Image (spheres, grey):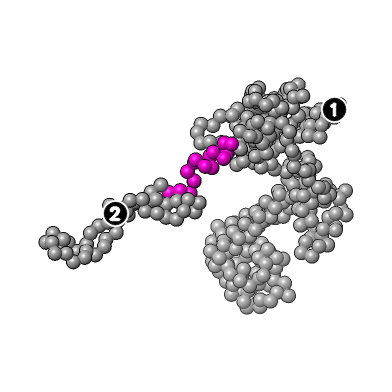
Amino acid sequence: MPYRIAGIDVHKKKLAVVVADVEVEEEYQFERRWYGSNPEQMQMLAEWLSAQQVEETVMESTAQYWKPVWGALERYWQPARQNREGAGRMSGTLHLAQALSNRGRRGRKKDFRDAERLVKRLVSQELVLSFVPDGEQRLWRTLTRTKYQRTRDKVRLHNQLEALLEEAHIKLSSLVSDLLGVSARRMLHALAEGETDPAALAALADQHLRATSAELRDALGACTELNPVYRRLVRLALDDLQLIEQQISQLDQEMASLLRQHQDAVQRLAEVPGLGVDSAQQIIAEVGAKARPSLPPRIWSHGSEHARETKRAQASTATNARPRATVRCAAFSIKLPMLPSKTKAASSRSSIAVSCRVSATTKRSGPLRIASVT
């Protein structure tokens, strides 16, 4: 009974698709097709794969371009294969292979050849496959990772603001523990609005601040002659920080809405020492809300001839090929003192030059050895 597998080499604008029956003992016969990456073309690809009775599909994780292809096949092709009568355990399975595990020999890149290599290496279990969750969990990941990037942007702006104040001789960060705290923000907003009196700025600090009023006036003394450009830059930094904080708050609300059905799992994780609600949401977004055992490793009954050929090729390559770490040769010269000699020619020279050619090898081949001495 034929068992067909499809391999897709993903590009930004086009897809190189091959399909082959892997139940044969002889060399695989691939059928090749080009498809575009727009939604209409990907729907046509799903219909063609269904017509070809493809059981599994493997693609390479090329940047972010694999995501729309995965989503289209997950929507149009996968349900048709899984819900049909007589579907097997692996019917409708999508595989995402890491690009490094599908690397070929050096030379000109061939798109269809890369797609064929994906199929062959999937059969021989030579690919490193990535875990891709369902669409709902992928949406959780998008939200948490977007929030993580916004948090990084906030830290970056915080550092830029501190550097700007140091350049303007405003030593506020040396007296307050948090430059974005309530007291510091009040003083920075007044500074950006054009306040030039250090005493007025120091009076905006909270009474529980450890720094004294005299210390604050001394740290803010440069505001009397501050260039207006610095004030405008401080205003821009504060506006950017406010926008990022609003975006983070919106992302928190979106995440809480999506995880409302899994609130119990979030609360249980948040009670773990060292974790909080944010950490719990990130963990659930990455690993899922329920712990599920992974599938056992597949045992291929087909493609045995290709697997044997692959093992023989790897064995011959390991035996005959030069190790990558081998250094071909290195030449150097040393000078040795000349021993006393009775000949006039030898006594006129104080040293001789010895030229050695050394070949460096790996630990497998042995220690460093001298190939020739002249």
At x 61%, y 33%, the residue is 309
In the rendered structure, the answer to whether residue 86 lies left or right of residue 56 reads right
The answer to which of 150 and 343 lies nearer the viewer is 343
In the rendered structure, the answer to whether residue 362 lies left or right of residue 133 reads left
Q: Is residue 264 magenta?
A: no
Magenta stretch in the rendered image: 312-327
Q: Is residue 144 visible?
A: yes
Q: Residue furthest left?
A: 344
Instruction: Name the spot of residue 320 as percent of width and height, x first.
Output: 49, 40
Q: Which residue is mark 1?
A: 86
Q: Residues within 10 Å of mark 1 (few under 14, many from 20)?
A: few
Instruction: Name the spot of residue 145 as percent of width and height, x first.
Output: 71, 49
Look at the numbered discs 1 and 2 and tell me whether their residues touch, using CB distance below 8 Å: no
Dot 2 amino acid type: Ser
Q: Single out the mark in the foreground, 1 or 2.
A: 2
In the rendered structure, the answer to whether residue 291 lies left or right of residue 237 reads right
At x 56%, y 29%, the residue is 110
* Quadrant assignment for the N terminus: top right
Instruction: Name the spot of residue 201 as percent of width and height, x first.
Output: 65, 69
